[in-house]
Amino acid sequence: MATKRISWTKVDEAPALASYSFLPVVRGFGHSCGVEVEIKDISLAGRIIANFPEKLIEEQRIGDHLTELGELAKTDGANIVKLPNISASIPQLQAAIKELQGQGYDVPDYPEEANTPEEKKIQERYAVVLGSAVNPVLREGNSDRRAAAAVKKFAKRHPHKMMKPWPESGSKTRVASMDDKDFFASEKSVTLPAATTAKIEFVGADGDKEVLKEEIALQEGEVLDSSVMNVKALREFFEKEMERTKDEGALLSLHLKATMMKVSDPIIFGHCVSVFYKDALAKHGEALKEVGASVNNGVADIYAKLEKLPAEKAEEIRKDIEAVYEERPELAMVDSYKGITNLHVPSNVIIDASMPVVVRDGGKMWNRNDERADTVAMIPDRSYATMYQRIIEDCQENGQFDPATMGSVSNVGLMAKKAEEYGSHDKTFVAPGDGAINVVDADGEVLLSQTVEAGDIFRACQTKDVAVRDWVKLAVNRARATGSPAVFWLDEQRGHDAQIIKKVERYLAEHDTDGLEIKIMRPVDAMAYSLERIRRGKDTISVTGNVLRDYLTDLFPILELGTSARMLSIVPLLEGGGLFETGAGGSAPKHVQQFLREGHLRWDSLGEYCALMPSLELIAEKSGNAKAKVLAETLDAAISKYLENGRAPSRKVNEIDNRGSCFYLAMYWAEALAGQEKDEDLRAKFGPVAKALGENEAKINDELLAAQGEAVDIGGYHPDVEKTAKAMRPSETLNAIIDAI
């Protein structure tokens, strides 16, 4: 029997907890078919530990599993199941560091202001942990994201109940974005005629030069971009929208990607905070500077740093901050009960998670009274803001979508080789003065130049030709397989997109597209086209760049399925392997909070179940392992039964949670294996397993439910393995059956 290995990622929060229940099932069932599972720790804590081995004792050290997986992803033998991971903000990083230090790990503090060479070096080492540290390393292929057929059918038969009507009396909700001097307006792009290297340098008004980045490797045919956000215009935009929103009587909200865009968006977030609280910050600027408060980390950081001041001064600042709320528009709330606003911490401002909920909730967000109210959604850069405004206008005109009848928008996403903006982190800089920031090639020729003022945000990014060619091929293949139109969301008025359109037109000519409907449309028009089809129950394939891939694969699944965690995400890697992603984890922190409080984990592992199926199919294809094929087919049957019987976790304590869901998935899988006729060995092996699980169903449920209702201690954010395993596998009866396979 051919043996193949699945690399299963250890991550954070709810998906990590759920793995403690599901992995024993995967290992037990897989072992019977020659399939082994290895664990690779890419959690936030794991990445911190791996980056500072010299400071740790031998028992504390772990390998650099992220780098190892990155190298594996470049091989034909890769078979990686990647659970949702954290794109850590600075506050999240600092919290994880503090906890690790409390557990005896001698890792250094993160220096927000790096003033010495040693601090700069530490900051650089932590840079590979912050933000989207994981995804660009593993995504050595383009993305194919869609709802599995069984999931979509179930969603139509049993539509989720979360959709709220759009008010017939009218809605004040709108998207606000800049009309000039944003990244969209300034973007310049060039396709490299030959391989070279380049550097990024700042040229001051006095002619002095400062190299910001050396040795950028550029390939022939690669698309290179640069753009700049003018912060003066940005701040004027924020002030104007704050005044207008106050007059309109709507909530004010900010929507960025301050986790994934780990350099540029936290700075934009900070400018919004400083404009909103400008009176209080101007009055107390010196005191706040002395204690190291950073607007880029949100108003929560300001409150936290007040503890370093004398009590009387701290109270004065608190009162002045509170007074701001009387003069400014009311802020949308993240947590009304705790007083956490939209400007509290940058990691709460995640556009792909927040904007779909605005649409789902009838154009509303929560106010301080825990009531829904219309909102002005500030999305400063126009590159993608227009498509959100279009869906809001559509709902204002046509009402809410119906999950029971609406079609699907799947996605083919360009993300291989750190494509586009998500690969810009190491090429994003704050302009040190007035002048220009240039990208200069090895011969001294200026490839791209941006005029800047002090404080402006400059970023450059790259898109490899091999990634674009593969993306086009994947789009054609999906259009052929489904018969649905494939729409490239590209705007010829944007510098980058104009270059990509030329490549798309060239590479489409390499394929047989007879009978296929393939279009190139601006994002705002592609959104209108897709929405019109959705309302008629028709399916459409969105073919997008990296950021829109992220945004749309939350937006449409949340409307269609109630969650993006139920999406199937297949990444055919460029070298022939496979990466299988398991949905989104935006709600994972709240799930953990509930679990710790009352022993109920509502995380639905359906994404993991669905990802495992193509992973097993790849093993069967690559190794000729027929048993793995049977395992995949029976898992598909088990998932369908899981959905039809309503075994997803409940949101309420003392009802079925993730552990109970995992039990039923295992029971249905064993039943399917016992009932199939393609492999007699598997039929014989899993017959007794199915019988044991079925006969003990009531007892197992009782044991699982008995574990709920009380607080749970798992040892912290970097959890204790034994404590967590005990909490997530509380049924001795179930454990005995699974462990005996």
Image (cartoon, rainbow, N blue to C red):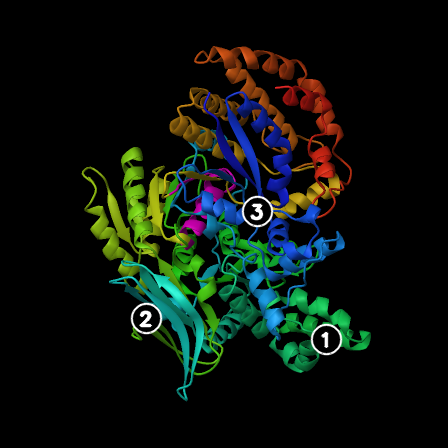
The residue stretch that appears in magenta: 547-573
Name the residue beneath numbered marker 2: 442
Name the residue beneath numbered marker 3: 42
Magenta span contains residue 361? no
Magenta span contains residue 567? yes
Answer few, some or many: residues within 10 Å of disc 1's Cα (few below 14, many 20 plus, some between 14 and 19): many
Q: Is residue 538 left or right of residue 130?
A: left
Circle 1 SS class = helix
What is the x, y in percent for residue 83?
A: 54, 41
Circle 2: residue type: Ala
Residues at marks 2 and 1 touching, judged by CB atoms closer than 8 Å: no
Circle 3 SS class = loop
- Residue for point 31% across, 56% down: 490
Looking at the picture, tell me which residue is in the foreground, 1 or 657.
1
Q: Which tag, 2 or 1, sits closer to the chain's start?
A: 1
Looking at the picture, tell me which residue is in the foreground, 258 or 687.
687
Q: Which tag, 2 or 3, sits closer to the chain's start?
A: 3
User: Which mark is drawn over residue 210?
Assistant: none
- Residue for point 41% across, 49% down: 549
Looking at the picture, tell me which residue is in the foreground, 431 or 548.
431
What is the x, y in percent for residue 359?
A: 48, 50
Circle 2 SS class = loop
Circle 1: residue type: Ile
What is the x, y in percent for residue 273?
A: 58, 70
Task: Specify the farthest residue to the right.
Answer: 311
Circle 3: residue type: Ile
Is residue 614 placed above or below 400 in the rendered structure?
Answer: above
Res 621 → quadrant: top left
